[in-house]
Amino acid sequence: MHNPNFLIIDSGVGGLSIWHEIQQLIPDSHVCYVADNGAYPYGALDESVLVQRLLELLPGLEQHYRPDIIVIACNTASTVVLDPLRAQTTTPIIGVVPAIKPAASLSASKHIALLATPGTVKRPYIDRLMLDFANGCRLTRLGSPELVHEAEQKLRHLPVNEDIIREVLAQLKLDEQDIDVLILGCTHFPILHDEIRRLVPAPIRILDSGAAIARRAHQLLQQMPGPQAHTTPLTRNVFLFTAETPHAHRLEAGIERFGFDKIRFLGETTTQNDQKPGAS
Ligand code: DGL
């Protein structure tokens, strides 16, 4: 029986919130998780730089790990890179984008808020989502690089600064407005869900895209005829950073609960333990 193989990529630990949901729904799956810390944070990159980065990075990873599904576990990237990426591969690609459609249908006040990276909030993709799925809804947008950093800290068991989270959320003026749904439109933010929940007034719903992405992956796998003949499935999960830094090493303890036993760096040779014999 073939265990589904995923290739999941984000700038850092954010995509682990997506991998967590996939693991819950499809427990027999394995992943090569890529944290592109060499280009972190994606939210600060020009669109063209980000697109180029992923177009260059993914083919080698795909060829080596031969995933059944690639997940771009990053809203900042998915809102700009999905079309060019899909044009260069036949492997199914799932992109993570802000949960605007479910937020709009949940909202009674028809005023929703999007908390994402500075890159994501200004993307035309968001305007299209609003037009297609949230017509008649008002959207308040806030871009925050600070929360991305706090999530990176949290998974390294480093102090999380709750004052910073409070200051960021204060900019949304949730007490004064009729916003009733808050979208976490960055995969890093569900890692801070508890901290954010404590600071957001109780009636306001907080939504992210994780569970929907896992359901989409499950559905795609059901439609697949079976593994490709050339597929050499992973037998354990691989966590890869694209750059070796002391900060990257600090993540060692934090990734255990996501099913990884060690951190690797792009360019290190993969051992036979990671893949069934015959893997290239
Ligand atoms: N986790 C990413 C997202 O969903 C990006 C964080 C960053 O590198 O700025 O947008």
Image (tube, helix red, strand yellow):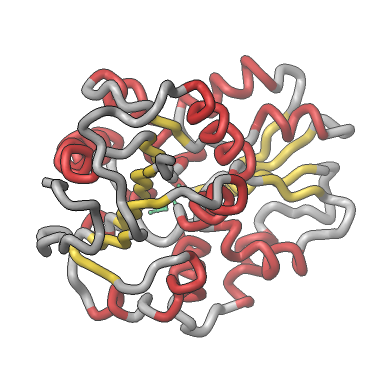
Viewed as shown, does residue 134 lie left or right of 7?
A: right
Image quarter of residue 194: bottom right
Residue sitting at x 28%, y 78%: 249
Residue sitting at x 28%, y 71%: 263
Image quarter of residue 268: bottom left
Viewed as shown, does residue 156 lie left or right of 63?
A: right
How many numbered marks are there? 0
Query: Nearest the camera: 79 or 121?
Result: 79
Q: Is residue 99 above or below residue 280?
A: above
Query: Nearest the camera: 207 or 117?
Result: 207
Q: Is residue 41 visible?
A: no
Q: Is residue 89 visible?
A: yes
Q: Position of residue 52 (x, y in %)?
A: 19, 35
Query: Nearest the camera: 39 or 266?
Result: 266
Q: Is residue 55 above or below residue 265?
A: above
Viewed as shown, does residue 250 lie left or right of 161?
A: left
Residue sitting at x 38%, y 35%: 69
Q: Position of residue 211 (x, y in %)?
A: 63, 43
Name the quadrant of the N terminus: top left
Q: Is residue 180 above or below residue 79?
A: below
Residue sitting at x 38%, y 49%: 43
Q: Position of residue 275 (x, y in %)?
A: 24, 54
